[in-house]
Amino acid sequence: MAEATGMVFRLLSFRPVALLALVFLPLLCLSSAHAEEEAAPLVAYNALLVGDDARARLVIDFDRTPTFTYHYLTHPARLVITLPATAFGFPDDTLEARGIISDIRYGATGPGQSRIVLTATESIALTLAEVRDEDGSAARLVIDLAMTDAAKFDTLVATQRAKLAGEAEGALPEAAGDTATGAIDGDAESFVVAIDAGHGGVDTGAVGEDTKTLEKDITLDFARTFAARLQAEPGFESYLTRDSDVYLSLSKRVELARQHGADLFISLHADSLPQTDISGATVYTLSDRASDRVSAALARRENLSNEIAGIDTTDEPEEVTDILLDLTRRETQSFSTSLADRVVAAFKGRIGLINNPHRSAGFMVLMAPDIPSILLEIGFLSSPEDERRMLDPDWRDRLIARLVEAVKQYHDPLVASGG
């Protein structure tokens, strides 16, 4: 009895701190284990960088959801992505610079911090930065970049510096998000048509049979006339992808149109064919399978433009096909077909057309998933008759007048339906 009483006395004489320790020690151990798990570095186990000289996409897979911030640096233009401590578990040669990205580096930059630095060949702007949950067991960081003009990039950097005064390095405030898209401000009420003069610079295009006229000169002449006529129409705005004899890659032409808020993209060409008896205008829309052998051959020739300038046009891997959303592409293709039909209707009986004038093929310059696009072959420089017409200012003006009418006919139903 005395022994039992003594045991109870000893228990009651425990200090409160000791009692609390007995109760909460298991909980503290669990909490400590959780903290250690939280302190463990992220694991980046897969990565991919794709793109060309106009756009780039960086994709990195993590073992769990990462937090991240980003900011721009100048001289040269760079995007810096700041992450918590990260173990980069993919091979060193997984991420290789390409296209607009001239260098990519990544690694720890201090206790609890890692960074990825993307160096660009020209001014850039972030167009997408998000983390996508991958079935709850992993996460994917997606970063999209696009070329922009130097003035826009300078504005991005200046805005960043002003807003980051007194804040931690690497955090770009949400208020600057609209600026980070790289889009060019324009009149929201205007219907913008991007007019693309095919070829240019080192890429001369076709050469006339009789006068040796260069395709790049004819397309620029027609593009300037078209832009001026369309600009004079109320509610319309025109944008020339090139207004001088300069080379632009196929991707840059599309990206410039996108950044200027284009509602339509019309690329002007005057190609040549082995058959000198084929003449007349042709309107092309995009298709995975060419409508005929002539269209397939023309698309192959036009798509060589990048190779002429030494630009790599390697197909992107399937992992990034979600950039071109299928639903958006199908809807855009429907609008492209509508525009092509209106151009053919406007030309019929007034401007000579080839047989079956609406054709399709895999023209790279028509691959924007979000902008209705057509390629107009004004005529063929392999045909002496077409060449003579294309050098006639009066005939040029008649064709441009019908083209403007086609654009207006396309635009009016959209306005009426609120599109």
Image (spheres, rainbow, N blue to C red):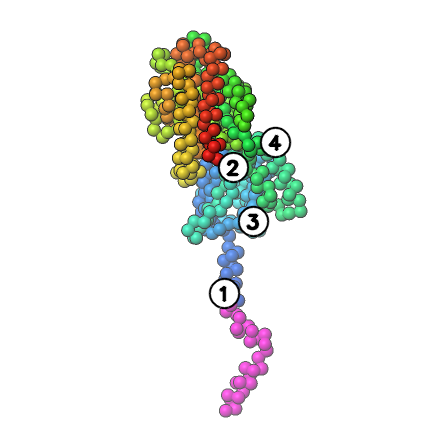
Is residue 345 a member of the stretch shown in magenta? no
Q: Which mark is residue 151?
A: 4
What residue did someone put label 1 on? 30
Which of disc 1 and disc 2 is earlier in sequence? 1
Residue in the image at 45% along x and 49% along y: 133
* Disc on the earlier residue, 4 or 1: 1
Where is mark 2, residue-wise? Answer: 145
Q: Please tell me in which quadrant of the rendered image residue 172 appears.
A: top right
Q: Which residue is mark 3?
A: 113
Name the secondary structure under disc 4. Answer: helix
- What residue appears at the point 55 percent right and 37 percent down from the top-left corner? 181
Taking the magenta stretch, the answer to whether it contains residue 24 is yes
Look at label 3 and name its amino acid. Gln
Of the numbered discs 2 and 4, the one sitting upstream in the chain is 2
Residue type at numbered disc 2 = Leu
Q: CA distance from mark 4 to mark 3?
A: 32 Å
Query: Measured from the top left, where is residue 210 in percent x and y?
Result: 43, 8
Q: Which residues are magenta?
A: 1-27
